[in-house]
Amino acid sequence: MLIIGIAGGTGSGKTTVARSVIDQLGSSQVTFISQDNYYRDHAHLDFKQREAINYDHPLAFDNELLLQHLKQLKETESTVQSPTYDFANHSRADRTIELQPNPIIILEGLHVLSDESVRGILDIKVFVDTDPDVRILRRVLRDIQERGRSIQSVYDQYLTTVKPMHEAFIEPSKKYADIIIPEGGHNEVGIQLLTILTEKYLLQSQLVPSVSHRTIGD
């Protein structure tokens, strides 16, 4: 099993890159995991308290549960039930997603490379590098259209947490990447390179009964 981590700032195109690779390889070969579904559960707090949490900090994520699920998929090859997240209410949703132990796992999220323990389980580490002005425009559209936020709340969150956390944690994590893909989903060459590496692994796994754990670039 090959685990690919795709990191990058908000609105960088991480999900687009992941979906492009999945489209080329086939969904039956790949399990997609969004780190966003692993925000910590704050159901015990009221809405105002949940709203005030810094969701752009690495500690906002339940990486212990995420790692547990990744190891279960990799080591026991059994399905796991991933949590989902309700962004409008800042809380975990009741619905879960069943994750299959496919040959390829793509983990996408802001802090996939920021956390040492998560980084350590990755075989290929990718950073999607996109201009800040493009990223913030995408963030505004997404948060208003998909997450029910107001323009004022998006503005306030960007200045107080999104931008500072990007500069403190996400941008520095780029140094850990094996592959850097500028401009996200628009970089067809970068996506094709990642797809070719993944296809090579799939071919080898079909020819060799057991493929050892390797990290490209280490």
Image: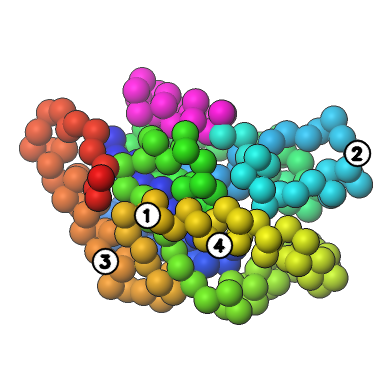
Q: Quarter-wise, where is residue 96 in the image?
A: top right
Distance from Cα at disc 4 to Cα at disc 3: 21 Å
For the residues carrying marks 4 and 1, which lies nearer the camera in this image? Answer: 1
Q: Which label's residue is closer to the chain start, 4 or 3? A: 4
Q: Is residue 68 left or right of residue 77?
A: right
Q: Earlier in the sequence, mark 1 or mark 2?
A: 2
> What amino acid is labelled 1 in the image?
Ala
Q: CA distance from mark 3 to mark 2?
A: 45 Å
Residue 151 on image: x %, y %: 81, 72
Across and down, in percent, residue 61 comes to 63, 40
Question: Pointer 2: what residue?
Answer: 46
What's the CA distance linking mark 1 and mark 3? 17 Å
- Numbered label attached to residue 177: 1
Q: Quadrant of the N terminus?
A: top left
Let me know if residue 79 is in the magenta part: yes
Residue marked by disc 3: 192
Q: Secondary structure at mark 2?
A: loop
- Amino acid on which disc 2 is placed: Asp
Q: Helix, strand or loop at disc 1?
A: loop
Pointer 2 local density, CA inside 10 Å: few below 14, some 14–19, many at least 20: few
What coloring was used for the rendering?
A: rainbow
Residue located 87% across and 35% down the image: 45
Point out the frontmost of discs 4 and 3: 4
Which residue shows up at 78% across the image and 35% down it?
A: 42
Estimate the x, y position of residue 81 in percent, counting from the top left.
Answer: 54, 30
Q: Nearer the viewer, residue 42 or 25?
A: 42
Q: Which of the two labelled residues, at mark 1 and mark 3, occupies the earlier sequence position?
A: 1
- Residue type at mark 4: give it: Gly
Specify the segment rendered in magenta.
64-83
Of the 4 image quadrants, the one containing the C terminus is: top left
Residue 76: in sight, yes or no? Answer: yes
> Where 108 sits versus 101, above or below?
below
